Amino acid sequence: MSTWSTRVRRRTLTLSAAAAALTLVLGGCSSGGSDEGKSSGGAAKSGGGAFPVTIKSSLGEAKISEQPERIVTLGQGSAETAIALGHTPVGIEEYAWGSDKTGYLPWIHEAVKKSGDELPEQFTGGEDIDFEAITELAPDVILAPWSGITQKQYDILSDIAPTVAYPGLAWSTNWDEQIEIIAKALGKPAEARTLISRIEKQLADAAATRPAYKGVSFSYIYTSGPGTLGVFLPEEQRVEMVSSLGLTVDPVAKTFKETKGTDSALIGLENAEKLSGSDVIFTFYTDAKTREEIEAQPLYAAIPAVKRGAVVASDDTSFVTASSIINPLTVPWVVERYLPLIDKAVAKAGGSAGATP
């Protein structure tokens, strides 16, 4: 997976393919969007009274003088939020690791096809942004509030179109803040709260169907290869998604020191025993070979939840990507797929679940 949220949120769903997989990796309302006021190009023409608008970021200011009609997105989550607001981008950063046979992230493909708009062009992002492809798309605005673009890249992008970058560190924008930023850039600031509330309700409704999750502790871990071990911290998006479904973050997570700018802590495999209080372990692997190598390590295999088989670890890269990022399209898409996996892990936790104070 080439760029993923590891805020180690890719701050997503970033540690090489494993690091790349670590660098993202990161239902009922599949599109989550509004069809109101769409033009033939997929951009809503309402909200004129919201312009001009200036959005500040750590890399510079984006001055948007009028309603954008041609939108390009970089990083993760921006395309989904724009689509949910009724604005299908003309171009998006490709994310091959999590894409399905259509060549797109499936929730994006489904939502755009449902809307009747044309699928966005895809281009290379990350460290090797295809600036020529973006220029050819003639964007009115470039949205990248949850991305890793550099100052140098930002300066080039800003010469193409007003570019909305992150307000703090790269890959560190909270999911709800990202929605607010994009809604403001697209002239629909009031709709941000609607999208945020919808996501919160979708997660809360799912949690209400699973009372058995109450009191079940978990840790969300990752590795960058044999001998390594990391733990995502409570505020990281994939952890927040699981806790919003009713499980409880193992309190041990609060004792770990964050690896700056990642919402995670590299604790080392030698400290695997510190996860003994976790009833369930959530994790992912970049490929089958890596999984075999990691699970063969005695210290890893001795983690109580791993030993019991109380582990949630999908080999579906689209699922891993979607469960690593919270936005209007991923949450409804992933929840119905997540619950059966969690059910099995909680069942294997058995009597240990809820035993940790």
Image (tube, helix red, strand yellow):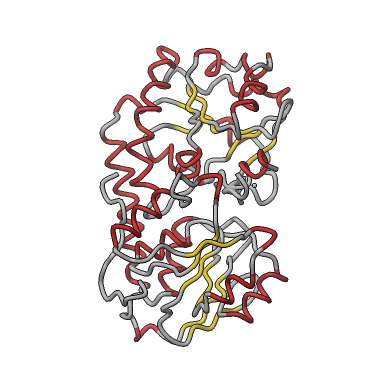
Q: Position of residue 189 (x, y in %)?
A: 37, 72
Horizontally, residue 288 falls left or right of residue 194, namely right
Relative height, residue 228 to residue 111 (above, below): above
**What residue is rendered at 36% in x and 57% in y?**
196
Q: Position of residue 46 (x, y in %)?
A: 31, 80
Quick one: 173 or 89, which is closer to the camera? 89
**What residue is rendered at 42% in x and 19% in y?**
353
Q: Position of residue 80 (x, y in %)?
A: 42, 58
Instruction: Please tell me in which quadrant of the rendered image residue 94 appears.
Output: bottom right
How many numbered marks, from 0 up? 0
**What residue is rendered at 64% in x and 81% in y?**
159
Relative height, residue 285 to residue 4 (above, below): above
Horizontally, residue 154 falls left or right of residue 235, namely right
Quick one: 334 or 189, which is closer to the camera? 334
Horizontally, residue 261 falls left or right of residue 187, namely right
Q: Position of residue 110 (x, y in %)?
A: 34, 52
Q: Quadrant of the N terminus?
A: top right
Quick one: 304 or 38, which is closer to the camera? 38
**What residue is rendered at 45% in x and 39% in y?**
319
Instruction: Please tell me in which quadrant of the rendered image residue 349 appears.
Output: top left
Quick one: 258 or 100, which is closer to the camera? 100
